Amino acid sequence: MQTEGATHEGGKGASVYDLRKPNADNAGWDVTIDEYHRYAEDYDLMQAMNMNCYRLQISWSRVCPDGDGDFNEAGIAFYHQLINALLARNITPMICLYHFDMPLALAQKYNGFLSRHVVDAFVRFGKRMVDEFGKQVPYWITFNEQNLYSSSYARVYAGCLKDGKQDAEIYTIANHVMVAHAQVANYLHATTTAKIGGMLAYEECYAATANPRDNQFARQVNEFLNRNLLDVFVHGHYSNQVLTYTKNHHIDFDFTVADQKDFDELKSDFIAFSYYRSSLIDASRVPINTIPNRYLDYGEVHNAYTPYNEWNWNVDALGFRDVLTRVYNEYGVPMFPIENGIGVRENYDGHEIQDDYRIDYHRQHIQAMKAAVAEDGVKVIGYLGWGLIDIPSSSGNVDKRYGAVYVNQTNTDSKDLKRIPKKSFYWFKHVIASNGSDLSSD
């Protein structure tokens, strides 16, 4: 939904994003960057920048307009075109099946992933996509940033138009999403040679002070938001601490014997994750009886030792290295960072955008990843930035730009959508050509 546009073309059905209306701070979804019509141009830019892997999302409502009804062959044909176009340019495709854009019909009829019916509908959709693309696409993920379904905003990502705010509802959404992931992953492994892994939005969480309670809360944030899912992805069971907590607090999250059987079969070929920033937790700010999943809602504080952008996201490359090394040490599964970048407000005035801050951000993080590999022994499959090109953020904000290619548009005006490489485009071209061995600015 952040790239394609063409929301009323090709037989696409509505998603929950179509309910979000544009305003001065967020663009609409009818056009975005018009990838539906301009993908060849953008793939040519990827090839020119020496990119050799690209993650694309399959819109559930484009290939199955109602989410659980007839499949739309025109929508499926569109993704065949995208994948063939990538392969023709020697760019390896990676598929993501869901990026928060619940088919509107499923949201309205069943309230999204609070419903078991939607789990079944997603698995049906996922299996059909595996049948269509499993032989061509070697890397898959089901849910973008799956640990977000364990957070206070789970209902937003899960397509819940009502409810979803209670503790038990958050845990129920998280479990339903995990069951859907497991069933699709098990099917992919049974029918193809492709690889699949779980994906998390990983923020390194530090204690705000030397207070042991801050350290305990930082550990619990990691346990409840990250390790609980990693334990399922790799070991086939939820965290002992999380299960103990939900039992002691009488949190019923619709976890069944059949769910555990799906988990017993599950394996992950890699751990994918996004990494943008780190966080600090001050336990004294967290109200009594708050579940650990919500600690950061109250206790996150500013880190004076790291720089921040205007959206209050900090730069912490050492945190990136620590995530890579710690997760690999604990789980022994190859790591695959598939989102990493910095959002900055930029304007094009006819001259090349000198985004040295973006070059510096990615240089620091690539250096951190190289250290994790060379010094810590981490196995890393690859590194994908967010992203090649400026696209609206998941909230719809065009002003928060991450790309190496500028797109000529604003939140209120699509303009001509002209693609204009920034200084970082040419830096990336050189870096990728050297496979990361040369990170200089020349």
Image (cartoon, helix red, strand yellow):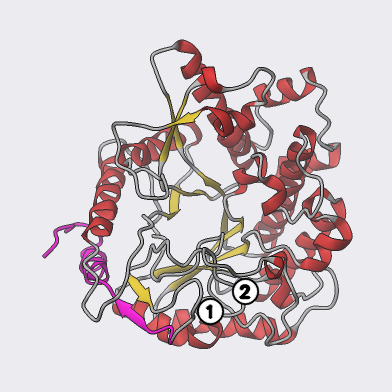
State which mark lies toward you, 1 or 2.
Answer: 1
Relative side of 318 to 170, left or right: left
Verify whether residue 431 appears in magenta: yes
Residue 433 in the image: x percent, y percent?
23, 69
Highlighted magenta segment, given as a residue range: 416-442
Circle 1/circle 2 CB separation < 8 Å: yes
Q: Amino acid at mark 2?
A: Phe
Numbered badge on residue 83: 1
Residue farthest along the front direction in this orientation: 24
Residue at 52 percent of width and 83 percent of height:
84
Q: Quadrant of residue 118?
A: bottom right
Residue situated in front as seen by the camera: 399 or 152: 399
- Give the labeled residue for mark 2: 133
Residue at 65 percent of width and 38 percent of height:
232
Q: Is residue 248 above or below residue 384?
A: above
Residue situated in front as seen by the camera: 194 or 376: 376
Q: Residues within 10 Å of mark 1 (few under 14, many from 20)?
A: many
